[in-house]
Amino acid sequence: MKVDCVRPCCYSPRPNAVALGDDRWVVDLISCRSPGKILMTIAKTRTVESPGKINLFLEVLRRREDGYHELVTVMSRVSLADHLSFTVLDSRLELNQTIESASDAQAMPAAEHNLIYRALAHLRHRTGCPLGMRVDLIKRIPIQAGLGGASSNAATALSVANELWELGLTPNELVDIATSLGSDIAFFLSPGTSVCRGRGEIVEPISIATSMPLLLVMPPFGLSTAAMFAALQLPEQPRSPERLLEALKFAQPPFSNIHLFNRFEEIARQQSPWFAEIQRGLLDTGAVAAQMTGSGSCYFGIFASQSHAQVASNRLAAEFPDCRFSVCQTVD
Ligand code: C5P
């Protein structure tokens, strides 16, 4: 471990620092002008963006004996992200949540039920690590939206704690832990766009030719993933993502709705006319394709450019005043 010497004589990285198990370090000042050992308090911190996702394709294949469903989905990370700061503590786990939307603030779970907290507690239990963590979360990704915000936060917490607590877990071990906490978390341990199978935890990253400009539209209501799975009619002839995967290889993004699919959309449309209305609104304002993400309730439009998406956002905000809009793009 290297830490920076705080003495004005060098400010150089010190290769021989020894951790005392919390944020205190003994630093050996061998090559300083005044050699010796000093005790320093150095907070180990990390600040990261935790991205959301959209499902470009989502088909449910069958019910499994463990109560979950076998599915095939193509997911892309998006630039709309939560902001997370981590600071290693001696032993406590502490989560401070700042939620930007008033409606999300009401629906947000208490800190100890948040997946970030559960992921860190699980990691400590599994590895025997005695260290603690303070996490400051600024929540920007709408919740109960199908944007994967909670899963992304959990994946970020696992990766950062593995590093800051110096646990040395391999990527496969992290995927195992992620999967025991939720179906979508493993996706966020890989970059960019992936085809996911099984419960969602078998993740195959794919390279896509270009980033897609997006407009996300969040209605004033969320949908529960478990309830959407429970309401599902299993297809007799499941759809395949092949047409989408072909289109993603070329420079242009998928150019129409024939490339996209989401099995949950038919259930969402039975629950509210909003889904058909927002799809029409997005296509009328220039989206090349538009679909619900995950088990809802957020809808996305794919646009030719960010400026097209911004113009559509301005127009639709007048027509759908109780919705939240976010111009963003798919990211690596
Ligand atoms: O795994 P996760 O906690 O995200 O799943 C939430 C709920 O969604 C599960 O309790 C289950 O009812 C349903 N689910 C499912 N099949 C999947 C993923 C989720 O039935 N592949």
Image (spheres, rainbow, N blue to C red):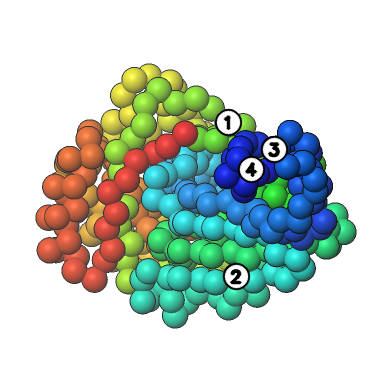
**Spatial CA span between label 4 and label 3:** 15 Å
Callout 3: CB less than 8 Å from ligand 1: no
Q: Can you tell which of label 2 and label 3 is closer to the viewer?
A: 3
Tell me, yes or no, whether the two marked residues, 4 and 2, touch with CB atoms within 8 Å.
no
Mark 1 and mark 3: span between their CA atoms?
Answer: 51 Å
Q: CA distance from mark 4 to mark 2?
A: 28 Å
Check disc 4 and report the residue beneath it: 4
Mark 1 CB near ligand 1 (8 Å cut): no
At 47% from the left and 77% from the top, the residue drawn is 107
Please identify, in this view, whether the residue under mark 2 or under mark 1 is nearer the observer: 2
> Quick one: label 1 or label 3, which is nearer the N terminus?
3
For residue 37, above or below residue 130: above
Residue 99 occupies quadrant: bottom left
Given residues 128 and 292, the one toward you in this image is 128
N-terminal-most mark, 2 or 3: 3
**Residue plotted at (51% across, 64% down):** 137
Image quarter hosting the N terminus: top right
CA–CA distance in space, label 4 to label 1: 37 Å
Residue 91: name its quadrant: bottom right
The residue positioned 76% from the left and 52% from the top of the image is 38
Q: Nearer the viewer, residue 288 or 62?
A: 288
Q: Which mark is residue 95?
A: 2
Q: Nearer the viewer, mark 4 or mark 3?
A: 3
Type of amino acid under label 2: Leu
* Residue 36 point in image, percent of width and height: 80, 45
| Badge 2 or badge 1: first in the primary sequence | 2
Q: Earlier in the sequence, mark 4 or mark 2?
A: 4
Marks 1 and 3: CB-CB under 8 Å?
no
* Residue sticking out furthest to the top: 250
Label 4 with label 3: CB-CB less than 8 Å: no
* Above-or-below relation of 113 to 266: below
User: x, y (%) of residue 37?
Assistant: 80, 48
